[in-house]
Amino acid sequence: RETAAHAEGEWARLVMKHSHDFGKTWSDRILLANSSGIPWLLSNILCLRDGRLVVNACSVGGENYLFWSEDEGETWSEPREIGIEGIGPRRMVELHNGTLIQSLTHEYPRINHWRNANRTVVYHSTDGGVTWSFLSIAAESDVLSPCEAPIVQLRDGTLVCYYRENSCLH
């Protein structure tokens, strides 16, 4: 992500470079998306078992998009909104059974506290990222504010989710 600000700047674009020699040299910048109407936020890349690459990214408003490449990142699809909302997407995970999961942060009003709360929610796709649906709430608290929560799957199938605590109460 190239931008003039951390979160909401006047512009943002998603670019990538690739290396074929373990990072000794890098390609020219490849423009994935500019800020034509979408001030891009966090983005991550995943290589699926079938060889496709997918980049997930969100807008300031919480709309989530996927970009696909079927030629090792040489060309990319236009961004496709996937119908799930939330900010702070972390690296998408392909589970052992092929299901894709994505954790996102939802903000909601909290009673009797000076700041809204966050909860970490998980969505999943069983059709290779075409359709997505709510799976679970991974973290929620009356006091703390869990967000930006990546998930990993261990060899035995166990899912582990760790998150940033953002309540500013400590």
Image: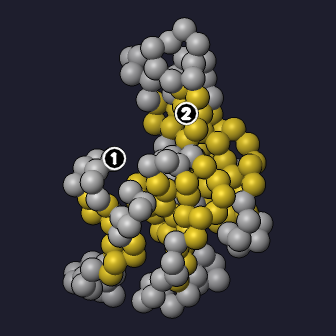
Q: Quadrant of residue 68?
A: bottom right
Give the residue number, with chain letter if any, for mark 1: 7
Give x and y (percent) for residue 30.
33, 81
Quadrant the C terminus occupies: top left
Q: How many marks?
A: 2
**Residue that appears at 58% across and 82% down:** 52
**Residue that appears at 64% across and 42% down:** 121
Please, is residue 110 above or below residue 37 in the view? Answer: above
Please, is residue 59 above or below residue 51 in the view? Answer: above
Give the residue number, with chain letter if any, for mark 2: 107
Pick the front one: 50 or 11:
11
Please, is residue 3 above or below residue 74 in the view? Answer: above
Q: Residues within 10 Å of mark 2 (few under 14, many from 20)?
A: some
Question: Is 42 positioned to the left or the right of 96 in the image?
Answer: left
Quadrant the N terminus occupies: bottom left
Give x and y (percent) for residue 83.
66, 58
SS for dot 1: loop
Pick the front one: 90 or 130:
130
Question: Is 2 positioned to the left or the right of 96 in the image?
Answer: left
